Image (cartoon, rainbow, N blue to C red):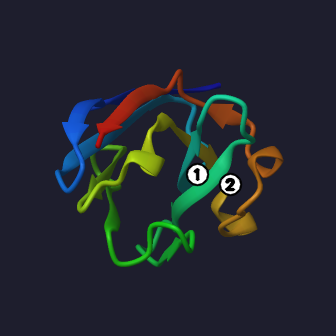
Amino acid sequence: QVQLVESGGGLVQAGGSLRLSCAASGRTPGTYTMAWFRQAPGKEREFVAGMTWGGWTYYGDSVKGRFTASRDNAKNTAHLQMNSLKPEDTAVYYCAVRPGILGIGVEANEYDSWGQGTQVTVSS
């Protein structure tokens, strides 16, 4: 079983930046894929970004050009640098992993290991 812990959320004004982190521990599934999702109140969980073990990244349309995902395989950590934040980015942000052989999935039900989430609030 893999454990994921997110950190770095908080309150920021529109146009500001935040950097989220995700630390993985326990039985990580080999060369695993990591992803970031977010969920706003009353909405479905939305794909934000995904990263393969080799560092290839893929972003959701709503964050392209503003968010940058990265990972450090040696430290089993991932980061999400969020710039030019908008009020509509307000959500709980989650990291998730799945076996690397499966690649990046954009649906929440394609991942079976999740962190507890970290709240990001962007004020206008």
Dot 2 crowding, Cα within 10 Å, few <14, some 14–19, many 20+: some
Dot 2 falls on a residue whose secondary structure is loop
Q: Which amino acid does the dot numbered 1 rest on?
A: Gly
Instruction: Give the left or right position of residue 33, taking residue 12 as reference.
Output: right
- Can residue 44 be seen at all in this image of the molecule? yes
| Relative to 31, residue 75 above or below | above
Q: Position of residue 63 (x, y in %)?
A: 45, 67
Please provide percent x and percent y for residue 29: 62, 45
Tell me which residue sits at (65%, 51%) in the image: 46
Q: Residue furthest right?
A: 109
Kindly tell me whether residue 5 is visible in this rendering: no
Query: In which quadrant is the N terminus drawn?
Result: top right
**Which quarter of the rendered picture does the C terminus lie within?**
top left
- Give me the residue at 68% from left, 69% from top: 103
Query: What residue is shown at x 75% (from left), y 47% (from top)?
Result: 108
- The mark found on residue 30 in the picture is 1
Please name the residue that numbered disc 2 is placed on. Answer: 99
User: What label sits on residue 82 in the rendered view?
Assistant: none
- State if disc 2 and disc 1 touch (CB < 8 Å): yes
Three-letter code for the amino acid on which mark 2 is drawn: Pro
* Residue toward you, 122 or 113: 122
The picture quadrant where one finds residue 83 is: bottom left
Label 1, secondary structure: give it. loop
